[in-house]
Amino acid sequence: MSYFYIFLLFIFIACAACERTKEKIYINIDEGKRSPCFRRFNGTHQIGCSSAPKGNVGVVHYVNSESDLNWLIDTGPHKPYSVLLNPADFNMAVVKHLLDSGKVNGIMVIQVEGHDDEFAPAISFSPDKACPNDASSMYKNSTDYGSCSKVDWNPVGESLMFQDLGIPIFVFTNYDDVKTTLIEKCYKQFNEPDATGSPRDYPLCAVELKDRMDGAVDSETCIRRTNHQMNLKPSRYCDPMGDRNVHGSLKPVMKNETRKDNSVILVVARMDSFSMFDNHYPSADNHVSGIVALLAISEAIGRIKENITKSDNTKDILFVFFQGEAFDYIGSGRMVEDMIRNQFPSSEGSQYLKQINLDHISHIIEVNQLAFRDNGKVWIHTDPISRSKLPQVDDMVESLKNIGEQLFDESEQDLPLPPASAQSFLKKKSIPTVVVTEHKKQYVNKYYNSRLDLAAEIKVSCDNKTSIDCYNEVSDQAKNLSEVADSIAKFVYKLATGNNASKDLYVDPNTVHHLLYCYLISPQCELFNQSLKSDRAKQLDSKPYPFYVGVDSQVNNYTALTYQMLVRYLGDKVENYTQSQCDKSDGMYKMEWMQGPYDMKHVNRTGFCIKALVNLSLAESYAFELENYDFKSGEFATWTESSWAIDAMNVRIFLIPSKNLEITTLVVGIVILVLSLVGGYIMNKGASKVFESSTPDSSMAPVAL
Amino acid sequence: MDLKRVKNEDKLELCRKYYLGGFALLPFLWFVNSVWFFREAFLKPPYAEQKQIKTYVLRSILGSILWICAIVTWVTIFQLKRADWGATADYISFIIPTGEP
């Protein structure tokens, strides 16, 4: 028993001073306070960041001015360096300058919310290309319009995302980590050159940035390696990117009926964007403004859908939200290919419905970025190549301009379409198409596809309001978007029915505001809560989900939520159904149980069952399904994302001694080892001289320890 | 096995087995034979079977050297050229390194 108490005593002593040596040496920057840039592949290239297998160690250097940068490149004697950059300094020129110097093996980018005065944000930054989705553009082979020859849509785009940077890059989001730990305790205390510019002596403060990617070369190589059966150590090298498209229509056309040509109007929006850093996909203007506008249109039209469904002479409206569009149109490319193969819709539950192919589509209306207004207007873009053959396009433009009065105007007619999902369709067939967006020529969004496309930039933020006020007070942006959505809804209605819309067709600014709140501020909002089953509503996060398409493992949160909203807006209540009846049902309609709004006493919710012709369809590239697909052909999207191990990411800060001290320590260690071996041998040999009874023989006997 | 306690004719038999076994693409048998019987073949005072053992050991040494040369050459070429060979190299690999071409 006493042993037990002694043991306990030891535990107490150990715990009283239980800081391990490791913890005394290293300061870790925790996950969640940092976010890595990672590696992706397409059919021909690898892009993004990776470190050495055990991480890159570099001496911390904070670049706060031009002279700091020049000092590092001209003087800095302690290479390799790991550079800490202000938010505004992270751009192509600086990164290239650093990489070309050969002195830098890691970059840390500051991005702390609410400290704009201290760490000023970039005036403009887009890691996308100046000509986004160039490789899959419908104008790829056109001499007149190819490679954005008329206009660079994204003039601030520097293509930083599409470089194979080869070093780890992290953003740091915690103010204390950046200000106190990195700048004050690490850089200023140990590394900052003195006033005359002479470098400091060892020990220096260094950081280890570990960001090890498993994949390499290109999609074809890493997919082949992942599938390689001989591999003794089965591991994944990369995974195809993809998710699901959301689509919903109004008129059921059964398998045994015929679907008339030119009887479906496509109204579409994109659902995704990207940025260079994991989990930093704010996507406010690009592309929440479009998602919200399209949902608002679907609500407005859903409210009066009987006018369309009751008549045989009206056109059906197919609302589609495409996923993976930022990556060479994964979603729309898939849908077009499915339509050509007569496999759309193909998902379960749709075996009752007649397929839709390209001939059935009469018009395409796409809503792109809408949060800003170029010259106070919203701009209509058309495709100059097909327009000459399709008189309907002129009618569409005129009709939309009439309905939108002063708000809508037409962009220059000889401009090609901006990057848009509609291009996937036009590549295969000339269909009358208009793209409605905020910019006349170049993008007005200065942060296209970047970590800085924040909700605050489009004036959707709560500031000091309580969350209830913030949710209920309709913002100016919501009014702005509902104006646009309202006109488009009326325009679509006129296309579908041939008649002008009545007063019943309107977009509700409240809906738009609630949607903006739910997508950009907190999915844990009343609207999403009402539109889900109670168990799923409980799982809603308070922070926005990523808008990045990601690898195709499970349905993305926002895809699932957008689906749910579209069901609610386009569907009908099924009276007298209980939740279990609703869950069980299958057929051509999708049925979803929604827990509904609170009752008058604000205690219980009254749920309802909604049936709708809404479904998910695959947004996965055919490149990964076809046998012997040529990945270099550029026919389908080939994007994959590198895998990484659980312990592949790590950031820690520590002091490093000079190389001389390291070598001296090692040599002294080896000398001591050799000396003790020799000493041990001599003592063993001469043991008999000291200990009378001990002979070499008796020393062989086992000794109890 | 301690060769000190083995009869000379058994040593020859053993050496011969290792030598013949090496022809079954087992170069390690030749290598072991070379090391194990080196003392018997060249350093021990002469005895009747020694001449034959010496022949086997010499041939084993020769075989091992050829094998070592062949393997070193192949490994060098493979390590230098693996990335360039692309798919072919992947199909003849058991372990493909992560994060590298």
Image (cartoon, rainbow, N blue to C red):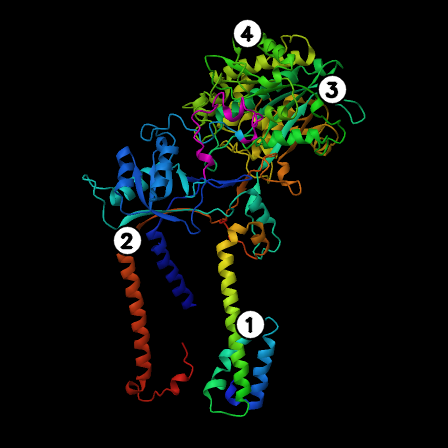
Closer to viewer: mark 1 or mark 4 = 1
Q: Position of residue A13 (x, y in %)?
A: 35, 59
Does residue A566 show up magenta in the picture?
no
Q: Secondary structure at mark 4?
A: loop
SS category of the residue bearing label 1: helix
Task: Write down the region rendered in magenta.
Answer: A135-163
Label 4 sits on residue: A405
Picture coordinates of residue B67 (x, y %)? 53, 69
Front position among marks 3 and 1? 1
> Badge 4 local density, few (<14 within 10 Å), some, or many (20+)?
few
User: In x, y percent, where is residue A414?
Assistant: 54, 15
- What amino acid is at disc 4? Glu
The answer for which chain carries disc 2 is: A
Q: Which residue is mark 1?
A: B27
Query: Regarding mark 3 in the picture, which secondary structure is present there?
Result: loop
Residue marked by disc 2: A657
* Mark-to-mark CA distance, 2 and 1: 48 Å
* Residue A603 visible somewhere in the drawing: no
N-terminal of the pair, mark 4 or mark 3, is 3
CA distance for labels 2 and 3: 76 Å
* Quarter of the picture holding the C terminus of chain A: bottom left
Viewer-nearest of discs 4 and 3 = 3
Q: Amino acid at mark 3?
A: Asp
Q: Which residue is mark 3?
A: A261
Instruction: State which chain disc 1 sits on.
Output: B
Inspect the image, locate mark 2, and give the three-letter code of the amino acid beneath it: Pro
Q: Are marks 4 and 3 in contact (CB under 8 Å)?
A: no
Quarter of the rendering containing residue A512: top right
Q: Are marks 1 and 4 in contact (CB under 8 Å)?
A: no
Q: In the rendered structure, the residue with mark 4 lies on which chain?
A: A
Where residue A516 appears, x then y in whole percent? 52, 23
